[in-house]
Image (spheres, helix red, strand yellow):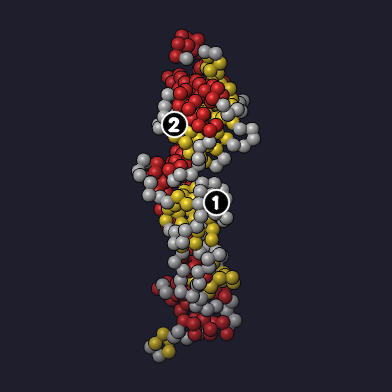
Amino acid sequence: MNSLSVIDYVDEDGQAVQAGLTELLDTQEGRESLERIARRFRVKTLIGSCERDTQDVLDDLDRMDVDDDDLAKWLTGSKSASVNPDMDFIDLKADRARQEAYDRAVSSLELVIERILDGKDGSGIPVQDDESEGLTGEWIYTGNVGYNDEGVRLCYRWHADLPDGVEFDADRFEVNSPHADWGDVDDRAIELTDEQRERLDEWISLRVAEEGLGEVNDLEQIAIQALAEEAGVDVKTYPVHDELILVDDDYKAGVHIRYSNPQQVRARVGSGSSTRKKLDPDSIRAAVREARRNNEALTLATTLIHEDGRFTPVDNLFSNCIRLRRSDDPCGECFRVWITFYGSSLVVTNSAFWDDPMVEEVKDILQVAQEEGMKEWA
């Protein structure tokens, strides 16, 4: 064992730890442990009144055939300790530098996303479709760089401040991983709710559109006009993945045009949605009307369920869906029901899970409430 050795062990809290021998012996506890071990094997730690060099003490212990892993166990007080044969202290410091740079990037991206979701101005974030020399911090990647072909992403570029003796390797680049000398953290690495993810995706794509990407063809212009007329709003457009999305200023109505075969139109109004397999004005108008109708069904069903009191509506994160939890069990598991109008009556069209007794209760709540004279709400 030498001063550059790295010891792996599990601490008293059950956490895996990697520590350099130099770090251990720089502590009072570590020096005292080494002195006890040296006395046990009758190895001198002093010459006169002066302390011997630590490496000289370790060399003497090695000449006495003291096993390195045993020495690691005595120094750390951990029965699991062993010397890492594949890493030295310089490697360990480099890995720590990479992890620290990556963690800072994650924290920075979390703050950027928090500001965006809070409505703070993010117009200064650059939008790029290729590499830029010296790029650091937050940026929006539009999907054309060879190392990452997974669509438009909000990213944060980081570089590790490597220790002396470690040369920066430009080929060691990773996305959402600290095991590199530099890389990007993108929005997939940040924990978000479905609703937050949807809002962030819309914001990212609008920023891309503001940079002049995504020209609108004649067919799409017809779709924009049809949505504007049906929803009674001004319409914005932006591209995301394989779709062109049209939305009003308040994001309360929208149409997704999917370019895969066959072309699809998916309308969204609030939490209501509807899909058509043709891209033409009549299909768009019909889809928007049905999406609005489904949103009205969700709003009414949420009100009825809330008034009944047995279940608490948690949110409407999914199209045509309400997520519910038993009111008397605030920590209980949630379940989902999909609701629409059938004629003038509210019906449950699907659920997760369909055979759950709680779903039957929801059906009864809606049926009884409407039978008691609440049909005029529909």
Q: Secondary structure at mark 1?
A: loop
- Neighbor class of circle 2 (other Cα within 10 Å; few <14, some 14-19, many 20+) is many
Q: Is residue 140 visible?
A: yes
Query: Circle 2 sits on which residue?
Result: 235
Q: Quadrant of residue 219?
A: top right
- Neighbor class of circle 1 (other Cα within 10 Å; few <14, some 14-19, many 20+) is some
* Left or right of residue 155: residue 347: right
Q: Which mark is residue 341?
A: none
Image coordinates for residue 122, horizontal then vertical, percent: 38, 46
Image coordinates for residue 292, horizontal then vertical, percent: 48, 22
Image coordinates for residue 102, horizontal then vertical, percent: 47, 58
Query: Circle 1 sits on which residue?
Result: 144
Compared with 152, 182 (above or below) is below
What residue is shown at x 49% (from left), y 62% (from top)? Answer: 182
Name the quadrant of the N terminus.
Answer: bottom right
Q: Secondary structure at mark 2?
A: strand
Compared with 296, 175 (above or below) is below
| Viewer-side residue, 79 vs 323 | 323
Q: Quadrant of residue 280?
A: top right
Please state which amino acid type lies under the numbered disc 1.
Asn
Q: Is residue 255 visible?
A: no
Please state which amino acid type lies under the numbered disc 2.
Val
What residue is shown at x 49% (from left), y 30% (from top)? Answer: 224
Image coordinates for residue 2, horizontal then vertical, percent: 52, 79
